Image (cartoon, rainbow, N blue to C red):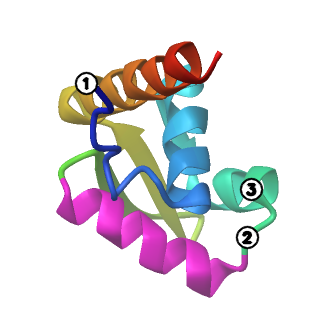
Amino acid sequence: MFKELDPILHSQLRLAVVSLLIGVKEAEFTFIREKTNATAGNLSVQVQKLKDAGYIEVTKQFKDNYPQTTCKITPKGIEAFEAYVQALQQYLKVGG
């Protein structure tokens, strides 16, 4: 009856990152940090977990001699997010 929720996306911060990226497709680390109100260290760990799962791509480069990290959602990440939302909707239907 209940589908298992994706443990990668079930973390509040990781879900927030993927939700942001669904809307913008690509964002700088500092933008994500500001929008999620996360610390740089915590966000860095969660971004790495999303990257390891194949849900986002991370590009590191230099812009005007400053490091710049950009995150981009992958097709696998979009698919996982959509499945997560559908699973949550099932929970709501059964409960309602």
Q: Which mark is residue 55?
A: none
Residue 66: tell me if it is visible: no
Vertical position of residue 29 compared to residue 81: above or below: below
Amino acid type of the residue that numbered disc 2 sits on in the rendered structure: Ala
Labels 2 and 1: the sequence-earlier one: 2
Callout 3 secondary element: helix
Residue 91 lies, with reference to residue 44, above or below; the image says above
Q: Position of residue 62 (x, y in %)?
A: 46, 67
Q: Residue at x 40, y 18 (%)?
A: 86
x and y, in percent, of residue 35 in the image: 78, 50
Residue 1 or residue 82, whichever sits in front: 1
The answer to whether 75 appears left or right of 32 in the picture is left
Query: Which residue is identified by label 2?
Result: 38
Q: Kindly check if marks 2 and 1 are in contact, taking CB atoms under 8 A apart as contact.
A: no
Find residue 87 and report its image quarter.
top left
Quarter of the image where one finds residue 73 = top left
- Image vertical order of residue 44 relative to residue 50, above or below: below
Residue at the image point whose x is 34% and y is 57% from the top: 8
Q: CA distance from mark 3 to mark 1?
A: 22 Å
Q: Secondary structure at mark 1?
A: helix
| Lateral position of residue 64 relative to residue 14, left or right | right
Residue at 59% over, 64% down: 64
The residue range painted magenta reads: 39-53
